[in-house]
Image (tube, rainbow, N blue to C red):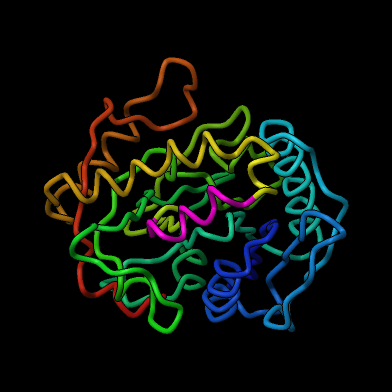
Amino acid sequence: MKKIAAITMVRNDDFYLRKWVEYYGRELGKENLYIYFDGLDQEIAPFCEGTTALKVPKIGKKVVSAEKGRLQFLSWKAAELLSGGYDIVIGVDADEFIVVDPKRGQSLVEYLSEARIKGSMSALGLDFGQKVGEEADVTESLPFLQQRHYAQIGTRYTKPSIMNEPLTWGSGFHRIKGRNFHIGKDLYLLHFGYFDQKRLEERFQDKDRLSQGWGKHMKKRSRTIRLVTDLKARKFECWTRFARICQRLVRPPYAWNKPAMFGLRIIVRIPERFSDIL
């Protein structure tokens, strides 16, 4: 089996980070997790014990400059890990989880150890929302996938998060600079950043995020909840298969190394076989 690390950077995000440590710790081993806290004023939570968790000086004061600096920093750290004995590095935000379709019967390490990775690999993005009127507020006592069942197939979250050679991520892990991308079969990136109306409203009131200019971004992303609530859910197998083909072939005119889907808004219901993953 290949040696695989996961890295992330967080600020005031213990809710998601707890789940991140739990999931990737189970899949990769906590000793292979590298967490960088953005700001020396941050506190390292007890649940990070067993990981490499470090505080670093705060990167940037505004969202654009902070994102560029953050991803440059994480790209450097990934390169260090790859040159230091790791075969693969996964870079994701704390609210993002790369999972293998349970129908394969493989762990994440088993899947990636067999995969042909040409510099980097993407997982098909699924952006989870809350179906208002059907799904209640999220609770930490239950797995996410037992509380949320609908997601938009999102090109924004089909990210080249997996790399096996030193490369440079663009802002938000959305692309590898100067390189194409490949979407792994039966591999998904589950994004939970906007999957709960109440939690999203609390984020709108976070003075730290608002001071960096995240308010407009968060309000824009809240439309995921509206789309999941209003649009009819389509068949998972059929539309994820279509999305892989479409995103591989279609690119936005402003960025040839990012996926596109003609602006289609496709909501799918997640099969029950995923419900115990996280």
Residue 149: x percent and y percent? 25, 64
Q: Nearer the viewer, residue 217 or 81?
A: 217
Left or right: where does residue 64 sit relative to residue 269? right
Q: How many marks?
A: 0
- Which residue corresponds to the image point at 60% horizontal and 74% vertical from the top-left? 21
Left or right: where does residue 64 sit relative to residue 135? right
Q: Residue furthest top?
A: 253
Left or right: where does residue 219 sit relative to residue 268? right
User: Main structural element of the magenta stretch: helix, strand or loop?
Assistant: helix
Residue 240: x percent and y percent? 23, 49
- Which residue corresponds to the image point at 63% horizontal and 59% vertical from the top-left? 88
- Which residue corresponds to the image point at 33% horizontal and 45% vertical from the top-left? 224
Q: Quadrant of residue 179?
A: top right
* Residue 198 lies in the magenta stretch: yes
Q: Nearer the viewer, residue 241 or 136?
A: 136
Rendered-image quadrant of the N terminus = bottom right
* Residue 197 lies in the magenta stretch: yes
Q: Quadrant of residue 13?
A: bottom right
Residue 78: x percent and y percent? 73, 53
Left or right: where does residue 9 sit relative to residue 117? right
- Which residue corresponds to the image point at 34% horizontal and 80% vertical from the top-left? 276
Q: Which residues are magenta?
A: 195-206
Rendered-image quadrant of the C terminus = bottom left
Residue 105: x percent and y percent? 32, 77
Q: Quadrant of residue 191?
A: bottom left
Q: Nearer the viewer, residue 68 or 16?
A: 16
